[in-house]
């Protein structure tokens, strides 16, 4: 559970009907209060990291109508939509689209249409009328968001537990997925295990601890290599912003007691071409599990990033973006050869320290 704690022209207001539910909200989209949308916690103003601030300013809420109702769902939309299949970025356990603050700009500079989506129950969506946040609800919500706004097969990118989300989704909705990118995949855990059987009072106490700064600092330090304290504190503050929303505890407990993701038996059914990315120094997911995943997926390639921990898209964004772009373009015309891709090789840590 600690693995991911370190760590989107608005469409017109509309009525969406489906499942006998209507959704109308004139505040549906990007509502500004200075630099940031006003649905973000006010603590976002204290973030110093330029890249996090820029991405936070682009977050908006879209109405997504699914089986549990209508949720104003947070995401970062692409600056430009194209005819080719887009890259859609998920995030890890109990995290947000801000995980992609360094990699998303690289992808956009390379000309890739890129979405960053908050998984139901996490991120900055409006869960004032809290729906169930179990696996089936998360899957249905993601599908309806895709069906309503994206409408083309995705290159679906899942880091850590986001890999389990991506595998579960691709097996259930193969037509919505073009290919997969799995980053330090957490896919061999059998759900939330004994946590699902905790009394609610105990579960809420555990979730309260998960929100605490000391636990988040520890998780952030585990996720990266030799992180300076000042950077660790800043990244911790970014990674826990969504915990300050009033429904975060309820959504997290709901997911915990639902049993969580167990996709072990689904892996062999993944037919999509897959890129597996591993951080050489991941202290959270054993490298052997990445090799096992490579062996069990029928159409996968594996790339290891040296001197990199559990969250490569934060620690080595230039490398991750290059790998994704090459993977996206690998089956396209000769005019889009991988070796024509250009990325600026600047370590994220240098960028971040310059900002804070």
Image (cartoon, rainbow, N blue to C red):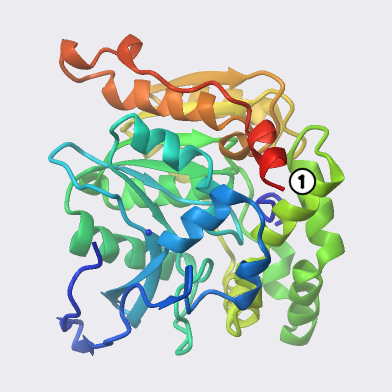
Question: Taking 329 as reference, is 242 above or below it?
Answer: below
Q: Position of residue 154 (x, y in %)?
A: 27, 43
Q: Position of residue 177 (x, y in %)?
A: 27, 43
Left or right: 71 as drawn, with respect to 349? left
Q: Say if residue 2 shows up in the picture.
A: no
Mark 1, Cα crowd under 10 Å, few <14 / some 14-19 / many 20+, is: some
Q: Residue at x 62, y 69 (%)?
A: 45
Question: Taking 205 as reference, is 344 above or below it?
Answer: above
The quarter of the rendered structure image containing the N terminus is bottom right
Q: Say if residue 83 shows up in the picture.
A: yes
Asked where in the image residue 239 lies, by quadrant, the reply is bottom right
Q: Residue at x 52, y 27 (%)?
A: 318
Q: Which residue is most to the left?
A: 83
Q: Secondary structure at mark 1?
A: helix
Q: Which residue is mark 1?
A: 231
Q: Position of residue 307 (x, y in %)?
A: 72, 21
Q: Residue at x 66, y 61 (%)?
A: 47
Left or right: 100 as drawn, with respect to 186? left
Asked where in the image residue 76 lies, by quadrant, the reply is bottom left
Left or right: 162 as drawn, with respect to 203? left
State how many labels appear. 1
Q: Position of residue 59 (x, y in %)?
A: 42, 63
Left or right: 160 as drawn, with respect to 83? right
């Amino acid at each position: 559970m600690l693995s991911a704690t370190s760590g989107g022209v608005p469409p017109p207001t509309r009525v969406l009907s489906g499942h006998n539910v209507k959704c109308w909200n004139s505040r549906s989209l990007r509502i500004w209060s200075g630099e940031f949308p006003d649905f973000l916690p006010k603590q976002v103003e204290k973030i110093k990291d330029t890249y996090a601030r820029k991405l936070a300013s682009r977050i908006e809420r879209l109405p997504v109508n699914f089986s549990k109702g209508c949720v104003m769902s947070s995401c970062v939309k692409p600056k430009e939509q194209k005819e080719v299949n887009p890259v859609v970025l998920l995030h890890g356990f109990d995290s947000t689209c801000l995980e992609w603050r360094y990699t998303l700009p690289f992808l956009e500079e390379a000309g890739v249409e890129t979405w960053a989506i908050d998984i139901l129950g996490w991120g900055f969506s409006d869960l004032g009328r809290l729906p169930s946040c179990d696996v089936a609800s998360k899957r249905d919500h993601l599908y309806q968001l895709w069906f309503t706004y994206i409408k083309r097969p995705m290159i679906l990118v899942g880091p850590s537990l986001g890999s389990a989300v991506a595998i579960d989704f691709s097996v259930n909705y193969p037509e919505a997925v073009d290919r997969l990118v799995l980053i330090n995949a957490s896919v061999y855990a059998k759900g939330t295990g004994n946590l699902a059987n905790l009394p609610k009072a105990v579960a809420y106490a555990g979730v309260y601890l998960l929100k605490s700064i000391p636990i988040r600092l520890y998780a952030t330090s585990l996720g990266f290599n030799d992180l300076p304290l000042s950077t660790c504190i800043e990244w911790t503050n970014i990674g826990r912003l969504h915990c300050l929303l009033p429904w975060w505890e309820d959504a997290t407990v709901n997911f915990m007691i639902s049993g969580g993701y167990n996709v072990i038996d689904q892996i062999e059914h993944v037919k999509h071409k897959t890129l597996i990315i591993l951080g050489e120094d991941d202290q959270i997911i054993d490298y052997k599990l990445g090799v096992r995943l490579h062996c069990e997926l029928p159409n996968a390639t594996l790339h290891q990033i040296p001197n990199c921990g559990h969250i490569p898209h934060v620690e080595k964004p230039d490398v991750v973006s290059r790998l994704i772009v090459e993977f996206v373009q690998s089956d396209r015309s000769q005019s889009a050869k991988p070796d024509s891709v250009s990325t600026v090789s600047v370590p994220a840590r240098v960028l971040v320290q310059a900002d804070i």
